[in-house]
Image (cartoon, rainbow, N blue to C red):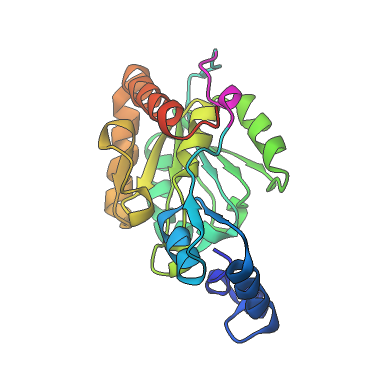
Amino acid sequence: NMLHFHEVGPEHHLLAPETAAHRNIVRQISTADACIGYSDVITEDLRDLNRKTIQLATNIPRKFVQPREYKRGERLQVAILSGSVRAGILAELWPALTDFSKRYADEVEFHFWGIDPAAYGPLACAVYFKSFNYHYEGYLNSLLEASFDVVLVPLDHSTRAAQSKSPIKLLEAVAAGAMCIFTDAPPYASLPDDCCLKAPNTIAAWSAALEDALAMGPTGRTALLERARSLVVERYETE
């Protein structure tokens, strides 16, 4: 949400209200022949400036969410796929990951795509890091080569910018063959409880959610994945 992107961090102060860049964004939205939003909050903000606004949810091609053969390992593969926007909340919830890694050091591994885990302290299990990919289709193609079991989607939803998020991480998780654990937050309220897990932003709640995901076993996690896939095909695929 470029109208509130300055809330993401001080590095984006040039987009704050009353700046030339912000006024330019407002002008472009206000004078556009049509505006398209991909979340409820962004669509609301666009409509305040331009009544010729529509909302779309169709934002992933079918080829990325089709069933395929997954390479499941002996260890639970847990992934976090994000840029710096989730860095703060991940730091708050890090003790849940630390404790989980200690309890299941030989049964779990963590994959960080975009956020470097070195900034948070060591985990007791295997850890893998991949730099943020700014080419989105290239990133989606990389997900097709992965076979994660669980994708974690924590979110600090205290700002308008964060509340503007869409459920796109569910789509990406399906591409990677994984079920999701989301923060129980407004951007994910439309996702049915039978296709993902949700937890408030407390260490205890995220510890319990990780335990639940492990205890489900492959059959339970696959059931959530397939229900998520059905939802994505019905609601979000571009075809």
Q: Nearer the viewer, residue 118 or 143?
A: 143
Q: Nearer the viewer, residue 170 or 209?
A: 170
Residue 67 in magenta stretch: yes
User: Residue 60, percent across and down?
Assistant: 56, 34
Task: Determine which quarter of the picture holds residue 185.
Answer: bottom left
User: Residue 221, percent across and down?
Assistant: 36, 24
Left or right: 175, with 187 as reference point:
right
Left or right: 184, with 71 as reference point:
left
In the rendered view, tell whether residue 94 sits above or below residue 192: below
Residue 210 in magenta stretch: no
User: Residue 224, percent across and down?
Assistant: 34, 26
Determine the residue positioned at 55% across, 39% down: 59
In which quadrant is the C terminus drawn?
A: top right
Most common secondary structure along the magenta stretch: loop
Q: Is residue 78 visible?
A: no
Determine the residue positioned at 35% across, 39% down: 210
The part of the chain drawn in magenta is 61-68
